[in-house]
């Protein structure tokens, strides 16, 4: 039996089946390349759902981790850690807001933003006790906790997990009027992704975030923007909200903030909002640990020093141009911003997964999202020649069909 098969068998026997991976087992990663246990090499076009904006094992980020590892890894927030102050200041300034609350996973940061918005509503806006509501958008993805799936519209995420957390209203995607109409005196937040990545790389019309900013200001509601996947250069700007020259009230980050090495997430906001959380009211044992802070600091430096947001914009535009030239009855639409690109297949193509399996055999790792969309999201620092090679495989597979 091949090592691959025996490892897959172990994973399927002893690991719960909460994912449906492509049938390969990875051992190593380096930049935009990964290798499996048989020694076969692949180009990584998924980037761990954008946790790998800086690629695998970025040398400067690995070095930051190793340096910190030799000093202090974890100490809890019972004490101030040296790295924590630096990290908080650097991230707040990088975003253009004032205060940071560090957590671990993306879902935790979203939960944190919800708690902050509710508390802000009661203490600053004067909403009646336990009456706060937050407006969310159809097909959203913000993570997997019970509260977060409470406002999901995807049956796979929800079914069997009730009872759900109240206090959320769901309106159609890309419809600022629907959001405005849903706002009432108890609304404390409007919670959106600037691009709905998990839903299939769905881009709202330009001006959407600007409209939401105006509406939130008009009704004194917090604009909560989840950039866990779109942030840190992915869409061709440091943050996707910058394409519209607005500033959110609460920005939620995760994934790439951990430099592709470990989890760290954060909520960033103005002091006047963040100050509603007082000692003892929220926390996390590992949240903001020195190891994670050092990695996040190095990641922000790499993003800036390597000018990766601009690179993402330029490479993304080139990829889009190339993909648009494919003439194939399989393709319904190609869309994206920066290096976050979706190829939506016609239903007649029979689902994106088969194409991802063929691409994997050819050495390109993509993953289907929502049945009919192939996501193209390589590390932002991928070598142009490697990017070309991967895109050519995608073009050839889609031109030929199955
Ligand atoms: C991945 C993701 C999350 C959840 O992050 P986890 O670290 O998996 O909990 C939330 N929102 C968006 C937009 C994401 O892409």
Image (cartoon, rainbow, N blue to C red):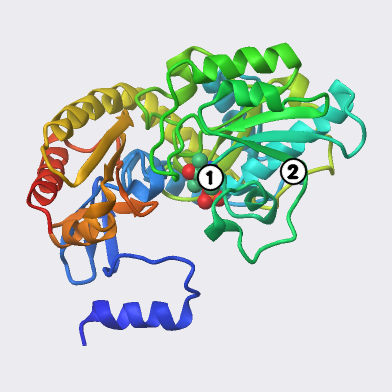
Q: Please say whether residue 247 is visible from this viewpoint.
A: no
Q: Please say whether residue 171 is visible from this viewpoint.
A: yes
- Residue at 16% x, 67% y is 39
Q: Quadrant of residue 358?
A: bottom left
Query: Residue 392 in the image: x percent, y percent?
Result: 10, 43
Mark 2 neighbour density, 10 Å: few (under 14) some (14–19) many (20 or more):
few
Query: Residue 84 in the image: x percent, y percent?
Result: 63, 36
Q: Earlier in the sequence, mark 2 or mark 1?
A: 2
Residue 204 lies, with reference to residue 292, above or below; the image says above
Ligand 1 within 8 Å of disc 1? The answer is: yes
Could you say which disc has been placed on residue 79 in the image?
2
Say which quadrant the C terminus sits in: bottom left
Q: Which residue is mark 1?
A: 141
- Residue at 26% x, 36% y is 333
Numbered disc 2: secondary structure: loop
Labelled pair 2, 1 in contact (Cβ < 8 Å): no
Say left or right for 276 vs 205: right
Numbered disc 1: secondary structure: loop
Residue 244 lies, with reference to residue 119, above or below; the image says above
Foreground of the two, 164 or 294: 164
Mark 2 vs mark 1, CA separation in Å: 34 Å
Say left or right for 31 vs 9: left
Query: Residue 202 in the image: x percent, y percent?
Result: 41, 35
């Amino acid at each position: 039996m091949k090592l691959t098969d025996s490892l897959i068998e172990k994973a399927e026997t002893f690991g719960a089946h909460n994912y449906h991976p492509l049938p390969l087992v990875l051992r190593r990663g380096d930049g935009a390349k990964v290798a499996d246990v048989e020694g076969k090499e692949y180009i990584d076009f998924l980037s761990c759902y954008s946790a790998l904006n800086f690629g695998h094992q970025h040398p400067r980020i690995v070095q930051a981790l190793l340096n910190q590892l030799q000093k202090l890894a974890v100490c809890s927030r019972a004490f101030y850690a040296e790295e924590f102050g630096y990290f908080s200041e650097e991230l707040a300034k990088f975003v253009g807001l004032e205060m940071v609350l560090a957590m671990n996973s993306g879902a935790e940061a979203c939960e944190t933003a919800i708690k902050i918005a509710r508390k802000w509503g009661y203490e600053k806006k004067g909403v009646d006790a336990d009456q706060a509501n937050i407006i969310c958008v159809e097909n959203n993805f913000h993570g997997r906790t019970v509260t977060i799936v409470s406002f999901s519209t995807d049956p796979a995420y929800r079914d069997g997990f009730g009872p759900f957390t109240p206090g959320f209203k769901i309106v159609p995607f890309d419809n600022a009027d629907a959001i405005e109409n849903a706002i009432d005196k108890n609304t404390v937040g409007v919670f959106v992704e600037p691009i709905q990545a998990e839903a299939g790389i769905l881009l709202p019309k330009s001006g959407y975030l600007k409209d939401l900013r105006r509406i939130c200001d008009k009704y004194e509601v917090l604009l909560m923007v989840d950039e866990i996947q779109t942030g840190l250069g992915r869409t061709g700007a440091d943050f996707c909200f910058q394409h519209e020259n607005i500033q959110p009230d609460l920005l939620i980050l995760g994934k790439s903030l951990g430099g592709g090495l470990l989890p760290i997430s954060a909520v960033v906001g103005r002091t006047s909002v963040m100050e509603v959380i007082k000692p003892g009211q929220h926390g996390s044992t590992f949240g903001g640990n020195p190891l994670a802070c050092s990695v996040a600091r190095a990641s922000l430096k790499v993003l800036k020093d390597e000018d990766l947001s601009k690179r993402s914009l330029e490479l993304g535009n080139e990829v889009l141009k190339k993909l648009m030239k494919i003439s194939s009855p399989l393709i319904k639409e190609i869309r994206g911003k920066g290096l976050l690109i979706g190829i939506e297949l016609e239903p007649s193509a029979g689902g994106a997964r088969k194409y991802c399996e063929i691409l994997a055999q050819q050495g390109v790792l993509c993953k289907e999202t929502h049945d009919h969309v192939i996501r193209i999201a390589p590390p932002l620092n991928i070598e142009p020649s490697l990017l070309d090679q991967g895109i050519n495989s995608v073009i050839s597979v889609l031109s030929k069909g199955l």
